Image: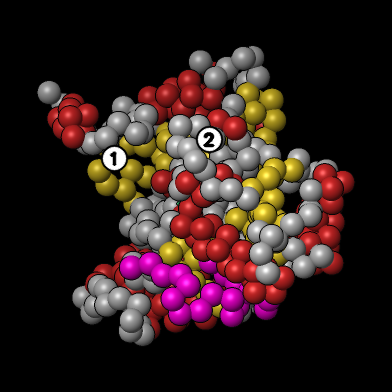
Amino acid sequence: MSNFDIIKSRDESYVAHTYGRFPAAIVRGHNATCYDADGKKYIDFTSGIGVNSLGFCDKGWTDAVTKQLGLLQHISNLYYTEPCGKLAELLCERTGMKKVFFANGGAEANEGAIKCARKYSFMKYGGGRSKILTLKNSFHGRTVTTLSATGQDVFHNFFFPFTEGFDFITPGDIAELRSKSEGVCALMIELIQGEGGVLPVDREYVKSAAEFCAENDILLIVDEVQTGIGRTGSLFCFEQYGIRPDIVTAAKGIGGGLPLAAVLFGEKTENVLVAGDHATTFGGNPIACAGGVEIINRLDAEFLAEVRKKGDYFREKISKMPNVAGIAGMGLMIGIELSGGIAAADVVRAGLEAGVLLLTAKSKVRLLPPLTVTYEEIDEGLAALEKALSR
Ligand SMILES: Cc1ncc(COP(=O)(O)O)c(C=O)c1O
């Protein structure tokens, strides 16, 4: 039996079968290079689905995390800790947002945003103005409420009754937003639909929607769980859209591999949730936040310019590969549209054999490499991708 077979067999016996896994067990890595249990090398173009912002075992991040680990791992939100405040300060200074609530994952961050929007409206206008509009084809998480918020019918199954008060509008159709705005407290959007197929939402539409929301005191929530923390070449994607959201949610890349998420509140929303309204045991955990501080400090203007440059490099090389019909996304969030009836999952499987870790997003192959991926790693991973695409 190979090491992989032993790991797989135990997993199959004892871990709930909620994930379709690829046939590899990754045991160690550095930056965008990793190795499986039997010693095979891979270039990682997934960063754990947009999580490992600084790659595997980055020295600065590992030092920040282990230093905090040796001081205090947890104390509860009944007490102050330094890393939590430091990370909140950095996020506010860099974005112009005013306050931060820390959570553990994307769905939980979106739950916080939804609660805040509903309370804002209830306190100001009373009941009956609690509806939240989201975009068709969106993805906002797997809790019962964030499944309700997700604009894809395929997710609205089995777990009835779902949370009420969500309706869906077509991205790009401003008239539909206007016509469905009765009783609405918030519009929640992804700027690039990640799970939906790496589909950027039209910039002019987003600007008009933001204006309409501001005029009507409808809160604008931007779900940056996948697009945030440097992924698209700016700290948050909303900066490139020229809008000022009332609430921004972040997760994935903010923890660099530890469970951490954030809800950023703007001027209208900073004081809506008060003691007793919302809480989570692990939120703002000092170890995760110490790592987060290192990540945000590293993502300065020069680093982000490099993310954009690497994104352009990827695009230029991929556009010349066989069976590529188009490339979507921004920065290091890349969706490859395939031609010739090729299935994205088959390319990912072939990529694994050729030595590169890839993702799918609907019918596209999706790349979310660590932001620190080197040009040598890019070239090596792209050579394997080209092999996979040529099959
Ligand atoms: C845009 C968006 N929102 C929310 C989520 C849910 O995040 P989590 O899996 O951390 O709950 C995801 C996950 O892919 C996402 O892409």
Residue at 48% across, 72% down: 277
Can you give x and y, in whole percent of width and height, for residue 309 in the image? 64, 53
Sequence-wise, the earlier of marks 2 and 1 is: 1
Foreground of the two, 241 or 391: 241
Q: How far apart are marks 2 and 1 (CA)?
A: 29 Å
Identify the image quadrant of residue 208.
Answer: bottom right
Residue at 42% across, 24% down: 349
Q: What residue sits right under mark 1 in the picture?
A: 26
Q: Are marks 2 and 1 in contact (CB under 8 Å)?
A: no
Q: Is residue 268 magenta?
A: yes
Q: Residue 155 carries which label?
A: 2
Residue at 31% across, 48% down: 29
Can you give x and y, in whole percent of width and height, for residue 219 in the image? 70, 64
- Vertical comparison of 11 with 88: above or below: above
Cβ at disc 2 under 8 Å from ligand 1: no
Q: Assess disc 1: are there few (<14), some (14-19) or many (≥20) residues with their C-alpha within 10 Å of its C-alpha.
A: some
Foreground of the two, 273 or 360: 273
Give the residue type at disc 2. Phe
Q: How is the image coloured?
A: secondary structure
Q: Main secondary structure of the magenta part?
A: loop
Q: Assess disc 2: are there few (<14), some (14-19) or many (≥20) residues with their C-alpha within 10 Å of its C-alpha.
A: some
Can you give x and y, in whole percent of width and height, for residue 190 in the image? 64, 50
Q: Which residue lies furthest to the front in this view?
A: 127
Q: What element carries label 1?
A: strand
Q: Nearer the viewer, mark 2 or mark 1?
A: 2
Q: Residue furthest left?
A: 1
Q: What stretch is highlighted in magenta?
A: 263-281
Q: Which quadrant of the figure contains the N terminus?
A: top left
